[in-house]
Image: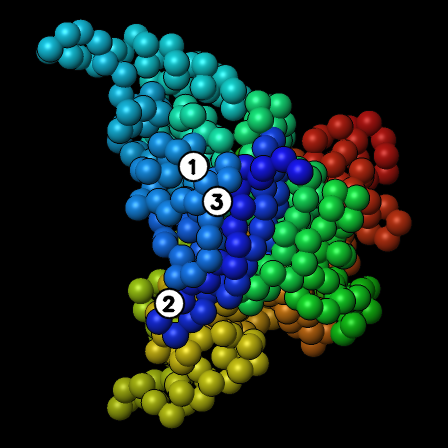
Amino acid sequence: MPTPRLAITSARKQFPGVLALDGVSLTLAPGEVLAVVGENGAGKSTLMKIVAGVYTPDAGEVLLNGELIRFPGPAEAIAAGVTLIHQELNLAENLTVTDNLFLGRELTRGGVLRTLDRRAMSERAVALLARVGLSEDRANVRVEGLPPGEKQLVEIARALGTQVRVLIMDEPTSSLTQKETEQLYKVIDALKADDVSVLYISHRLAEVKRVADRVTVLRDGKNAGELAKTEITHDNMVRLMVGRDLKQFYPKVHRTGTGGAAVLSVRDVRYARGPETPASFEVRAGEILGMAGLVGAGRTELSEAVFGVRALVAGGLLLNNESLRVRSPRDAINAGILLVPEDRRLHGLVLPESVGFNLSLPNLDRLTSLFGVKRRGEADLHSTWISRLRVKTPSAAQPVGLLSGGNQQKVVYGKWLARGPKVLILDEPTRGVDVGAKAEIYALIDELAGKGVAVWMITSDMEELLGMSDRVVVMHEGRVAGELAGTKLTEENVMRLATGGWNAEGEKG
């Protein structure tokens, strides 16, 4: 049997109060893509940081090409050919793409008085960018001027500029468009052809199936199982990750799927600095209305206009068939229209503050009197929603920024559910959330719809869209391109509408 490129044996890592890894082992062959999957807190990131020299294991061994290694830091790991691309990008925003590609390993020329070899770096930068599908005109652009997806590709290009033999990708597609994701797949295929080994971490199980040669599953800091290429299916991965079958991953337990009367009607709405074409649709009581569209279709912007973040310049809103004027988010909140935003860390939470603070913040009007905050009522609110949503936190005093992504998302839900929403707008409701937390969130959404809440769900996850939605409205370039339900609600029809080629009746658009 050939020597593995990387072998980890019985790795253990303890943090104060947390056993992050408990005897984890894996192997990685030359030119192989090994996906490491598991719920948040399973130990994936800790294991990758041990391989990349960020952490030192308390016990166990790490072998690179058969030799025992223990890197003092990331620099030594990179020098040995092991590079970790973090989910949170590590780029110097004020520098150009070329400067970032060679930061810390600049090319120089000359004798005693050496100077930067700008020409050599520029030529090399163009070649590296071409490998990840970026044009040469990006070489001299400041990173701060790039969209998130291109920043991710620059990070990958920088890794390719080293003599990388083991490339670790942590949620590499989290900010990529579908086109950029397809380009990433091509990059990975090229890396395999060059005998580079890839450790791939992702919550998106469909892409794991696309890229992985094998899958190692972690659960609670331990090995939960391994899947060969022919065994990699959504159900098999989920079963190992959560330790149980998720027979109703997309539940429709509490609702009929038909919906009742329209709760929110959006009538010929246009908003400031938006498209000229007005948008109209309605969300009914007791249903989940999915909204699909490609990146830039205007889904998030439309939801922000309804929520009062963007000013309406035409059209109007009806709530339970009565005219509603929304000039600010406060107007929407008072009317019972609540928004769970796409970026929970930026727009949904105050990260340095506690779980309790975040749950209380939009509910202070109900928690205060002439004498200040009603502490007992506030404590009851905290315990109620931490318990009901099963938020994994030591206490309500825990800073919310220290929770996992899934638990942060639950806190965002909790602060709004405490108000009793009439319309709940969910923008990418499970982005960056592990599969176990997704199942819990789906069950919660289904329960809310079953109680008569009108749920408007914006999602780019096709499985989620088809699995959870009762009806789907598809947007294309700022306009509503069509509506799908029943037998017409298929991936093919969604994409036809989203790309502007066909309408819901299958006729050419």
Q: Which residue is mark 2?
A: 15
Task: Indicate whether 62 appears above or below 469.
Answer: above
Frontmost residue, 191 versus 389: 191
Badge 1 crowding class, 10 Å Cα cut-off, few under 14, some 14 to 19, many 20 or more, is many
- Residue 290 x, y percent position in the rendering: 69, 53
Q: Position of residue 145 (x, y in %)?
A: 36, 29
| 102 is higher (above) or lower (below) than 488 | above
Q: Quadrant of the C terminus?
A: top right
Query: Is the C-beta separation of discs 1 and 3 under 8 Å?
Result: no
Looking at numbered disc 2 in the image, what kind of residue is underneath it? Phe
Query: What kind of residue is marked 3?
Result: Leu
The tag earlier along the polypeptide, 1 or 3, is 3
Crowd around label 3: few <14 · some 14–19 · many ≥20 (10 Å)? some
Q: Which residue is mark 1?
A: 83
Can residue 192 be spotted in the picture?
yes
Left or right: where does residue 494 sit relative to residue 455? right
Residue at image location 48% in from the left, 44% down from the top: 63
What residue would you read off at disc 3? 63
Q: Is residue 402 above or below residue 499?
A: below
